[in-house]
Image: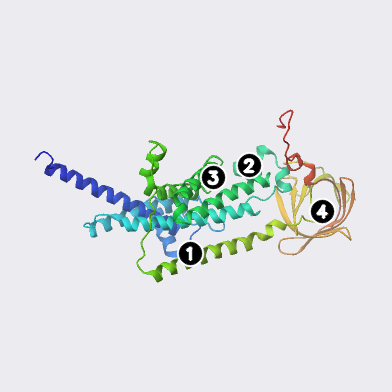
Amino acid sequence: MENEKTPGVLLLQERENIIKKFFSLWIVVYAFVFIGTSQFSFSFPFLEKLVLWFGTTFLHIKDLHKITNTGSGDTTYDFVLVLAGVIFSFLVSLIILIADRKRPNYRQLYLFAIVIARYYVGFTMFTYGLAKIFNGQFPANGLSRLEEKVGDMSPMGMVWAFMGASRAYTFVSGLLEFTGGVLLLFRQTKTFGALFSMTVMLNVALLNFMYDVPVKIFSAHIVLLCVFILSYDWKILFNFFVLHRFEKLDYNKLRVKKKWLQVTLRVIKIVIILAILGISISQLWGTLDEKPAPMEGAYSVKSFVLNHDTIPVAYNSKDSIGWSKMFVDYPGWISIQLNTDKKVWKQVKIDTLKKSFAMDNLDSTSYAFFNYNVRNDTVTFTGTIKKDTANIIFTRKQKKDYSLVNRGFHWVNEYPPNW
């Protein structure tokens, strides 16, 4: 009969089905691998040793090690980890396909992976969003940042300065991320939540790539996980957005046969959501009521006299004794910029009644003690540095003296304020 397929056609279709099964399984397995090993996942010593062995043995990377206590998620170790994850998921998928070759598809595993991806992306959007809604990720620019020249900033520093310049913009950015996270947690809104979150996170990923923010791997994977979540509805979305056909989204419910298990899962879901909200809000609540440091300001040295000898203020010089600037930005801490441009941090106790600065080294040993006198924008310090007498005259700038801080919002601008 004409409709009967030849053995060659059937063999080709079987091969195509195997290839399709393999790649879909590979994507699902890699999604699990990334979620379990990403930047903000738990640390596994065995995994770290395996990645280091892989990088040194097969990639011939010398001195490969996992850098701890860093905010970077784009270290050499992290890139090796991603490559190892891709290869590992490939091998695991191949083994599963060979061992379970009679299974027609992996639909249930695919649906379960989408559920895990939804919650992972949702909780990620939760935490990042709350950090911006409060004042955790992009706090207002400190005086050190305000005094820094734009040309001396790193691209990442520019992003942090830009975001920190507008509390309202940062808040709205966080609200959008938080909204995307909430939408992803419920089946009825998962598709809209994935589209919403992908749009928001695509902008974040572009900022990370274009401004060299070292969270490129993580942000790119969050966008890809959103695409993975949407893959279940790709035909419906294509028909609706491109072909303009009337479509209805599939509810995509992962079936749980036992009623008690379904109720238990819902209770666990609610508990986890409330726990994350409670922990995040409790940790970030204090950022809304941060009090300025006493005598806050950026102090530029006009005169620096040590043991009756005047040390000229010379930026980028070899003089490591004289000061060029001092920043009082955070309660209990000051930073001093030496003539060499090196910045050193000191602990400080400021008594505004006695008008005194007691400075200690980081090991709590005494460094300096000053009494100060304020006259308009001029502050005079008299006291000792270690065992040497010192007299320092500063010009003080406060946050209200910077255009970036005090400009505010204007509906009407006769000329663009782009100075």
Q: Marks 4/2: CA distance? A: 27 Å
| Mark sitting earlier along the chain (3/1) | 3
Q: Position of residue 40 (x, y in %)?
A: 51, 58
Kindly report which numbered mark, 3 or 1, lies closer to the viewer in this rendering. Answer: 1
Kindly report which numbered mark, 2 or 3, lies closer to the viewer in this rendering. Answer: 3
What residue sits right under mark 1 in the picture?
A: 269
Taking the image as shown, residue 43 lies to the left or right of residue 132, namely: left
Q: Marks 2/3: CA distance? A: 14 Å
Q: Is disc 3 surrounded by few (<14), some (14 to 19) or many (20+) residues within 10 Å?
A: some
What residue sits right under mark 2 in the picture?
A: 158
User: Marks 3 and 1: CB-CB under 8 Å?
Assistant: no
Please, what is the three-letter code of the amino acid marked with disc 4?
Answer: Met
| Mark sitting earlier along the chain (1/2) | 2
Q: Position of residue 212 (x, y in %)?
A: 55, 43
Please, what is the three-letter code of the amino acid marked with disc 2?
Answer: Met
Taking the image as shown, residue 201 lies to the left or right of residue 416, namely: left
Q: Residue furthest front?
A: 246
- SS for dot 4: loop
Q: Which mark is residue 326?
A: none
Q: Marks 3/1: CA distance? A: 27 Å
Please, what is the three-letter code of the amino acid marked with disc 3?
Answer: Val
Q: Residue at x 33, y 58 (%)?
A: 108
| Mark sitting earlier along the chain (2/3) | 2
Q: Residue at x 62, y 51 (%)?
A: 132
What residue sits right under mark 3 in the picture?
A: 204
Q: Is disc 1 surrounded by few (<14), some (14 to 19) or many (20+) residues within 10 Å?
A: some
